[in-house]
Image (cartoon, helix red, strand yellow):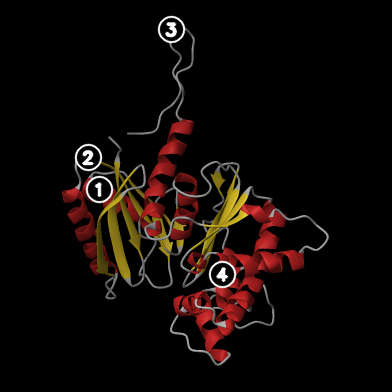
Amino acid sequence: MKATLLAVDLGGSKIAGALVTSGGEVRHVRTVPTPRSGLEPLMDQLMALIEELLAHAEGAVRGIGLAVPGIVEADTGTAVVAANLPWQRTPLAGIVSRRTGVQTIVGNDADGATLAERWFGAATACRTYICMTIGTGIGGGVVIDGKLLRGAHGSGAEIGHMIVDTSGPRCRCGSPGCLEVLAAGPAIAARMRALGGTAVNAKSVIDAARSGDPLAERVLSDTAAYLAIAVVNLWRLFEPELLVLGGGVAAAGDLILQPLLGHIERLTPTRAFPYEAVRCSTIHQESSFLAAASLVLEAEAEAAATRPTTIAASAAPVSSRRLT
């Protein structure tokens, strides 16, 4: 029987939770609005959701994974700060584990999405890879030799805040021309409208391009030009085996991938680039739950890797196992 994990994606507008098997099957999805009136109501809403899901679990829940935006101290499970959430260096993992009695792992949502590609997606056979998530914002993560790069203070690999145009518009972080302000979903819709087209959001632009609208195709190509700058720079820094594009915009598939590869070719005319190693993610519909579940799976794997092996009487080493 596959173990059950409880996965929660905690965002500025909604809290979504589900039960997830270690094989990636998602069950009992529940979504509630995120309270805007402070930390205590938010925690009450979160705990009510978790308790409801625990009641639906068949057997024991092996772990709870909380994927949250912003800066997280992964070692302590502390939510430090986020733009749209009232964290006050909140010891989120400790609070939830004490109330539920279940091991709880808290991580940045982009880190979770990156790990999900290793546990459930395109990077299952990779030790060094990069994930770039393109949606309302741009996030992602870098895995080097099997280890997620977190940085000295928990905010490493901020892919969306790479500066790709110093004369570009000011990003919400304060810097000019960040990738996020030029290539995330809102920027795609704004670019379409600026060129005289109609766009409610990035999905409407993608739908128009899928129907053969040349203006929408141009907008996606212009967006891909900025993404290509980031991809080439990331590749030259880390030389990964694979770079996975995830998030809602990457669901456009070849509509974004083909112009991206074309712009990469333009940027690397004299140096071979492994085009086949840039791929779109295959996990879209339930990616947020798989991201949260992957935080638990990764923590278990790390614990198993550091657990001392036992020497049997025959002097043969006993291999370590994941936590159960």
Q: Is residue 176 above or below residue 68?
A: below
Looking at the image, which residue is at 29% across and 68% down? 39
Q: First in sequence: mark 1 or mark 2?
A: 2
Q: Is residue 99 left or right of residue 163?
A: left
Residue bearing mark 3: 313
Q: Residue at x 22, y 59 (%)?
A: 49
- How far apart, in angstroms, are the residues tagged by discs 3 and 4? 60 Å
- Callout 4 amino acid: Leu
Instruction: Indicate the secondary structure of the residue bearing disc 3.
Output: loop
Residue type, mark 3 in image? Ala
Q: Report whether 267 appears left or right of 287.
A: right
| Between marks 2 and 3 in the image, the one whose residue lies nearer the viewer | 2
Report which residue position mark 2 lands on: 60
Dot placed on the residue nearer the N-terminal end, 1 or 3: 1
Of tags 4 and 1, the one toward the viewer is 4
- Closer to the N terminus: mark 2 or mark 3? 2
Compared with residue 160, is residue 21 higher up or lower down, i.e. above or below? above
Q: Residue at x 39, y 52 (%)?
A: 290
User: Of residues 199 and 19, which is closer to you in this image?
Assistant: 199
Callout 2 amino acid: Ala
Find residue 236 and report its horizontal and vertical position in percent.
72, 56
The amino acid type found where label 1 is placed reads Arg
**Circle 1 is placed at which residue position?**
98
Q: Quadrant of residue 3?
A: top left
Q: Residues within 10 Å of mark 1 (few under 14, many from 20)?
A: few
| Dot 2 or dot 4, earlier in sequence | 2
Image spot of residue 318 (x, y percent) = 45, 18
Q: In whole angstroms, how far apart are the C-alphas of marks 2 and 3?
A: 34 Å
Query: Viewed as shown, does residue 297 lie left or right of 35?
Result: right
Q: Which mark is residue 267?
A: none
Residue name at image x 46 percent, y 25 percent: 308
